[in-house]
Image: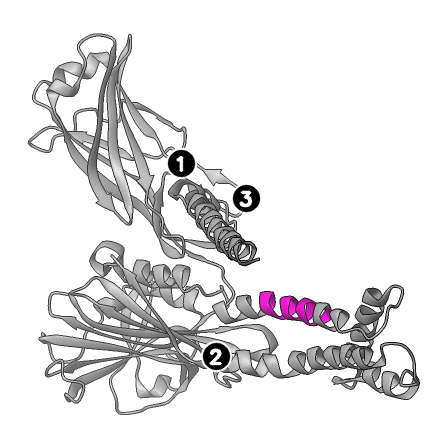
Amino acid sequence: MKWTKAWKISAGVLAVVILFTAVQLIQLYHNRSSAVYQRIINHNGYSLSLVKESVAVEFFLKPEWIPKEIGETKLNLVVAKKFDSDIVLEKVGKREKDIYIQLNVVPHPNPKSGQILNIALITNDSFINTNGPEWQITDTTGKDLLGGTYGGGEGPGNAISVDIPDTELSKFTQGAHVRFSGFYLYGYTKLNQSTIAIWLSALIPLLVIVCLIMLYRKRSEPEKNLGWKLIGHMLLGGFTFTLNGLRLPLGFAVYLLFFRKPRPNLSIKDKAALLGLTVYILQIIMPPVMNHFDSVPKQSILRNVSVEQLGMDGLLKMVIGRAPVSNQARVESFETVLAENGEVKELVFQFVDPVANGRYTHISSVYHASEQSVTLKRYTSDEWPQFSQTVLADNFIIRVKELELLKLKPAGGDHRYVKIELDPLFASYAMKNESNFGVNEKGVYPIGDNQLPVTATRLIVCAPQSLDKMSVCEDQINYYFNIVEGGALE
């Protein structure tokens, strides 16, 4: 008997180990780089957003890599590491009438969130390869060697190649500088439920099944189809009727009125009905509990994110793609401090995005220039009265680039630091006796007091004396863009 008990325990432990190992192997296979990459670019469980076009790579092509006879020189040389991807010079080959240089992109995606390069413009239902002048080949002095006389090809996958006629080979005796500027940069994030919601969605049905099994085993006498009857009593106990948006436990009330007469196994049937009522109660109390957890700020860090590489518009797009937020998101705040040479010293901004049931998600972002990272904190709120009065995030990002808003200056000439702050409300402004200017595609122009009020989005630009948060900001100018009324350019 003792050996039998020990054997059962050993078999149970072995089964658990095998099950755990199998789950881990399945997870490893499911999360291998190639599988994750395919799910990302096919929008399968991932949000994918275009961040930047025309991302470039440069390398020097050595003359000894070019075959003198028909054939290939296989190199598989990593010429750049960018945005969690390796750009590989795979080979240089020679055919009858030309030579070709082939690059490939090897992504290293993170299963949760990250950035990738691709040679195609990815939409929701297609991959578009462009055929613009993406290759540039120059000699050591910077002189263009080809003048546009080359061909090219794409695929399979992320492979890209340039074909150079044999007639141009004499120009490559000293090697050449090769530049390809046709990569697209994307930010992505996995679309997940919260961990708590996932566990609860799996745990509650399991507990219900366990409870029903335990009730069945506690039957006091044999009864035909007792298992199905217990399930029926549970469903009746959990049945609800909605009146004016209020869910009432009608099923349990019906059970108390009509199903309490003496009958076999009454005790466990009562408990099955109570189990249904408990599930009903959980459905009422769990949403507020989940909302509480959702309201607690959740922090994450986006690494290898550089405003020097992406530009301000690219960095904002990267955050939108990896947060992620919808195309209805708006800018809740934006503030940056730039050095005299345009270097970003400080950058803080916040998006607000509408979600279901009148709730809002807030994403607060802090850029760390020295670490090339962005810290994100997110939480949800029940209301945001100013939402409709704030500027759309997509529009703000476009205008930052189109109107060169980060080049706006305070009054009084050169300054060591420039602070640019967005007044997020689209409103009517009538601040007389202040420095007011309009900004549009034609440039910057003054707005006189007689042209006020002006209905627009406002940027406040001034000169802080230092990077201290309490530093006085002088020589303030109000810049208005997206003007719809007042402040006309004369």
At 29% from the left and 35% from the top, the residue drawn is 134
Residue 349 numbered mark, or none:
none
Quadrant where the N terminus is found in the figure? bottom right
Tell me, yes or no, whether the two marked residues, 1 and 3, touch with CB atoms within 8 Å: no
Specify the segment rendered in magenta: 201-212
Residue 130 numbered mark, or none:
1
- Amino acid carrying label 2: it is Phe
Q: Earlier in the sequence, mark 1 or mark 2?
A: 1
Report, in whole angstroms, how far the alpha carbon at label 1 lies from the one at label 3. Answer: 16 Å
Residue beneath disc 2 = 293
Q: Nearer the viewer, mark 1 or mark 2?
A: 2
Q: Earlier in the sequence, mark 1 or mark 3?
A: 3
Report, in whole angstroms, how far the alpha carbon at label 3 lies from the one at label 2. Answer: 35 Å
Residue beneath disc 3 = 125
Q: Position of residue 204 (x, y in %)?
A: 62, 71
Dot 3 lies on which element? loop
- Amino acid carrying label 1: it is Thr
Q: Nearer the viewer, residue 372 or 348?
A: 372
Dot 2 lies on which element? helix
Q: Does residue 203 belong to the magenta stretch?
A: yes
